[in-house]
Image: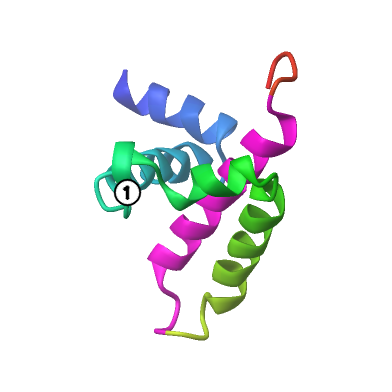
Amino acid sequence: MDSMKEEARQLLFKYDEDKTLEQAREYIGKTYSQHYTGKDNIQIQDVFEQMDISEAFTRGAAMKYLFRFGEKNGKNKKDLMKCIHYVILLYHYAFKGQRGS
């Protein structure tokens, strides 16, 4: 039975996207205890949102970590996790308030 489930999973996620998404979920969940926060638990991202620059900032940050991957500390998995996190934030800010986003 487990082998059938694994075969079905591999048909749906040929490149292990489901596993990568789970790793990203775990990484992102851990980051919130690591962020610098100020009074009232405000993060710099909250300030950027008030300044209406969150979309541009998250796009730039995602690009930074994507370009850094393989160049600084080799193929560092954490750089890609940071990139994925910023892409998810970019998605959030780009489609915030839209139905189904």
Q: Estimate the x, y position of residue 53 in percent, counting from the top left.
A: 69, 50
Q: Among all residues in the image, which is located at the extreme left?
A: 33
* Main SS category, magenta section: helix
Q: Is residue 25 above or below residue 68?
A: above
Tag 1 residue: 38
Q: Is residue 18 left or right of residue 2?
A: right
Horizontal side of 52 relative to 75 (left or right) equals right
Residue 76, image quadrant = bottom left
The magenta segment? 73-96
| Residue at image coords 47%, 52% | 44
Which SS class for mark 1? loop
Residue 4: where, in percent of width, then height?
40, 23
What residue do we see at 39% from left, 42% from top?
42
Q: Is residue 85 magenta?
A: yes
Q: Quadrant of the rendered structure where residue 93 is?
A: top right
Q: Amino acid at mark 1?
A: Gly
Q: Quadrant of the N terminus?
A: top left
> Is residue 16 in view?
no
| Label 1 Cα crowd, 10 Å radius (few <14 / some 14-19 / many 20+) | few
Q: Is residue 101 shown to the viewer in this render? A: yes
Vertical side of 58 occupied by 30: above or below: above
User: Dividing the picture into quarters, in which one does residue 94 lie?
Assistant: top right
Front residue of 83 and 75: 83
Q: Residue furthest top?
A: 99
Expressed as whole percent of the image width and height from the top left, the position of residue 66 reads: 59, 68
Residue at (70% x, 20% y) in the render? 97
Instruction: Report x, y in % for residue 6.
Output: 40, 30
Q: The C terminus is located in which quarter?
A: top right
Colouring used for the render = rainbow
Across the whole image, how many numbered discs are drawn on residues?
A: 1
Judged left or right of residue 32, residue 71 is right
